[in-house]
Image (cartoon, coloured by chain):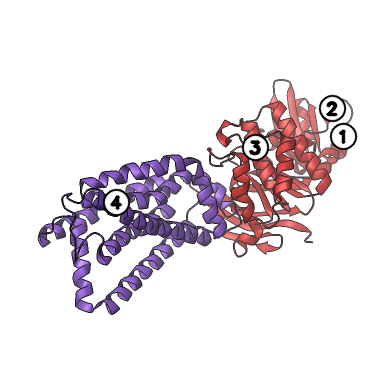
Amino acid sequence: MEDNVLEIRGVHKSYPGFTMRDVDLVVPTGHVTGLIGPNGAGKTTLVKLVMNLITREAGEIDVFGLDNLLHEAEVKARIGFVYDEPNFPHDVNARDLGRAIGPFYRGWSGERYRRLLGEFGIPVRKRFKALSKGMQMKLALAIALAHDADLLLMDEPTAGLDLEFRRDLLEHLAAILEDERKSVLFSTHVTSDLERFADFITLIRDGEIVFSLPTSDLRDAWGVVKGAADVLARLDAPDVRGVRTGPHGVEALVANASLARTKCGPGVVIDRPSLDDVLVLMTRGDSYVESH
Amino acid sequence: MKALIRKDLRLLAPYWWLILPGHVLFSANGVISPEFLFWIGVALAASFTVGLAVIDWRFDADRFVAALPVDRPAQVRARYVGAIGAAVLGTALYVAYGSVIVAAFPARLGWRTGAGAWNSPEGIAVFFLVAAALVLILLPLLFRLGLVRGIWSFGFVALAVMAVAISRVSNAGAEAPSQALVEELAVFVDDRGAAVAWPLVLASLMGLIWLSARLSIAGFRSREL
């Protein structure tokens, strides 16, 4: 088995008003990688490039060690893909959808599909258009899982779902992932969805990968320094990844919380950063600070 | 390939109740004239291709299909097999409806018999060739431009073809466009002999299918979904 289920090297893609340049990304096998970034950062573009829904202008993409263009069918047979908007024909029910899609996959199991539909509470004879948005997303997930995919590629799967449904969907997903150790690339701008079960986090901004790190590094080593404006002067500039100034002082995201603690001394609050802090401070803060 | 065609048939399944009675109803109007039956039959045969494109477009399903483990050339080839299959089926239905109409209304106007008749080999071949030609023009436009822009472009192409056809019909003094085509094919077969003419017709059709499919594959490859 390959160490990395997905390797992206030097990929370039441009649209009017948007350029993705020299993107490198690695998704390790058997782990959940969260791809975060604000709207328009390039998350969907990256996912579409992997699925060959759009054409890259330069670079290489290997999935399971195979070029995704040269081995398109072979690669896609091992990917479970979930779009931000499930887009199955509206007049078909879950049972017939399974019958239409199943023959494409060697690993498709009708029994597994029926079990997943049962677990997710999806009525098999109800037309797709009659299902709620959350149910439609669960159906997309059931289809992605029914052929025993090695890589789940999920593009904003929780967008537009209410909190309860999101939690329910993610709990199901977490349970399945815990059992089977599948590789997952999960793109979202709702960072709280990833807090619990992402092993790695990749931040993309303006078409560039800002960092790709184990979640534990972010949680344990990084920090949010909160204090008066003069606290910034005490921090090492290269260590500061983002700054936000508010009426009550500044918040600075630092990559080395213990060093910041030493530099700032007592009286300065240093919290563990949530993914939301990371996203907000690195993409919507006072200024972008280049990472190492 | 088989999975793609089966998938298309399954996705059409909820609409069979609309398609089948619709087909019978429209074709029944063929009693008005053989020309009417000809063009309604051609339109119905081509509507299979348009119908599937509409389903894809309406539900954004081309993105769903693009995620399946088949490459784009395979998707194009499957759509051609379906479209040509629909043209064959449409031709069979045209012959069936025509036979029923002629049997039920023997004195009906315009149903010529003998050489150049609607049910002569040339008459049936022209029906199939026109139905096939429609989808061979339509499919590259759909694959390259998507449904809305593809249909618009097809409309312009169809208008140009109709203008040429009408001028040829009026020059030839034929009664109707389809009749003029049947007569031209009959003359072609007479001039060259059946043993040469029919293989030539078949080879030309295969060449057109190949060319159209190449254009569709190139167009679909460069289309962003």
Q: Which element is circle 3 on?
A: loop
Residue A261, labelled with which disc? 1
Q: Residue at x 66, y 59 (%)?
A: A75
Please give the residue where the numbered disc 2 appears in the rendered image.
A268
The crowd level at tag 4 (other Cα within 10 Å; few <14, some 14-19, many 20+) is: some
- At horizontal 39% and vertical 41% (from top left) the residue drawn is B21
Q: Is residue A179 left or right of residue A115?
A: right
Mark 3–mark 1 contact, CB under 8 Å? no
Q: Nearer the viewer, residue B23 or B155?
A: B23
Which dot marks residue B79?
Answer: none
> In 3D space, how far apart are the residues under numbered discs 4 and 2 (Cα atoms)?
92 Å
Q: What's the residue type where badge 3 is placed?
A: Val
Give me the disc on residue B100. 4
N-terminal label among 3 and 1: 3
* Front in this rendered view, residue A59 or B192: B192
* Secondary structure found at label 1: helix
Determine whether label 3 and label 4 are within 8 Å by CB. no
Q: From the viewer's perspective, is A275 left or right of A287?
A: right
Contact between labelled residues 1 and 4, with CB atoms less than 8 Å apart: no
Q: Is residue B187 above or below residue A211?
A: below
Tell me the quarter of the picture where residue A41 sits.
top right
Q: Are marks 4 and 2 on the same chain?
A: no
Q: Position of residue B51 (x, y in %)?
A: 42, 46
Dot 3: chain letter: A
Q: Colour of chain A?
A: red
